[in-house]
Image (cartoon, grey):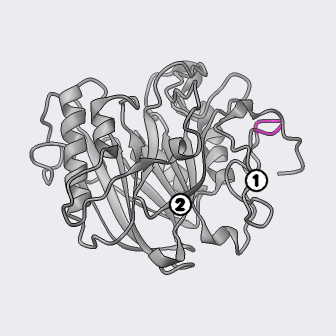
Amino acid sequence: MGNHSIPSSRAIVGRSQRRLALAGALVAGAAYTAACTGGHLAAMPDTSLAAEVVRAMSFNVRYGTAPDGEHAWPLRRELTFRVIREFAPTVLGVQEALRFQLDETGSVLPDHGMVGVGREDGVERGEYSAIFYDRRRLELLEHDTFWLSDMPAVPGSMSWGNRITRIATWARFRDRATHATFYVFNTHWDHESQPSRERSAALIIERIGARAHPDDPVLLMGDFNAGEDNAAFQALLAPRAAVPGNVPLYDTFRAVHPAARETGTLNAFRGDRSGPKIDAILASPEWQTLDAAIVLLEENGRYPSDHFPVIAVLRLPASNR
């Protein structure tokens, strides 16, 4: 990548001002600070200490057949791939991706596996809420997809007022570095129907609570199409009754940057940050968030997507491994 000077933190929201004591702060917000000259991001070095952290990214990549003109997928995909490669996620949740976009993304992530299905037929048709994972680091134990509807096992099913099919994909992993096991859920909620968003929250809470290994920590990432004060999003964070397997979740970004402003993640290919933060990575209490950020990278007026990706760097304490 060459040596590039690091400019101001304009290219990343929520850059941590503290220095993390991990061998030179090799985590997001320290080593991965901002866009470098020429649109590059500071890559995260591969070290044994860094191997103990989990780098998570949630990224609505905008579906590849959208009539976006100068922002069409073929014109921005290399920038999308650059953002992903240089953050080097351990787990990456993508939303809106079509099969050919996943194939292209996989080709630049040769060490990553992928789970997920197309939302229209449960095979390959329609958008995915797929999960990429670093196979060198994570062993895939099980995975599935369910539909955000009254018939969650029926591909293409819709309920609750949404006119577009909505899904959630999950996977359970074993960390080869720490031997911990954990779940990752990735979802994309409806953009129009508030009842759909609220029922989607309830179903995801139910599925997390019913996971086969209730002691495993959980990450939930996605495009929630709901701001931080929306009742559906708040339902994910609210303390819940002490039902076995149910856990409260917290927003990794707000854990590090509780007072950050201008955190909108739907940029509309204009760099707009005035709206709500609708993309997030949520974690169960076992996770320690070391850093979190919203990546604002643009290059010559072009953005990787109409959403800013969000990132978090986390670690499980030894007692949870």
Relative to residue 58, is residue 198 depicted above or below? above
Residue that numbered label 2 is attached to: 288
Task: For residue 117, say whether it is visible.
Answer: no
Q: Is 38 in the magenta?
A: yes
| Label annotation for residue 3 | none
Image location of residue 135, percent across then percent down: 52, 71
Element at label 1? loop
> Image quarter for residue 196?
top left
Three-letter code, disc 2: Gln
Dot 2: few (<14), some (14–19), or many (≥20) neighbours within 10 Å? Answer: some
**What segment carries the magenta color?**
35-39
> Image quarter for residue 199?
top left
Residue pictured at 19% horizontal, 48% vertical: 203
Q: Nearer the viewer, residue 50 or 173?
A: 50
Q: Nearer the viewer, residue 310 or 77?
A: 310
In the image, is 299 to the left or to the right of 321? Answer: right
Residue pictured at 76% horizontal, 36% vertical: 39
Residue pictured at 13% horizontal, 32% vertical: 160
Task: For residue 43, say whether it is visible.
Answer: yes
Residue pictured at 83% horizontal, 35% vertical: 7
Dot 1: few (<14), some (14–19), or many (≥20) neighbours within 10 Å? Answer: few
Q: Main secondary structure of the magenta part?
A: loop
Seen from this angle, which residue lies furthest left?
150
Three-letter code, disc 1: Arg
Image location of residue 3, percent across then percent down: 90, 49
Image location of residue 176, percent across then percent down: 53, 79
Relative to residue 107, is residue 14 depicted above or below? above
Image location of residue 305, percent across then percent down: 54, 32
Residue that numbered label 1 is attached to: 19
Relative to residue 314, is residue 178 depicted above or below? below
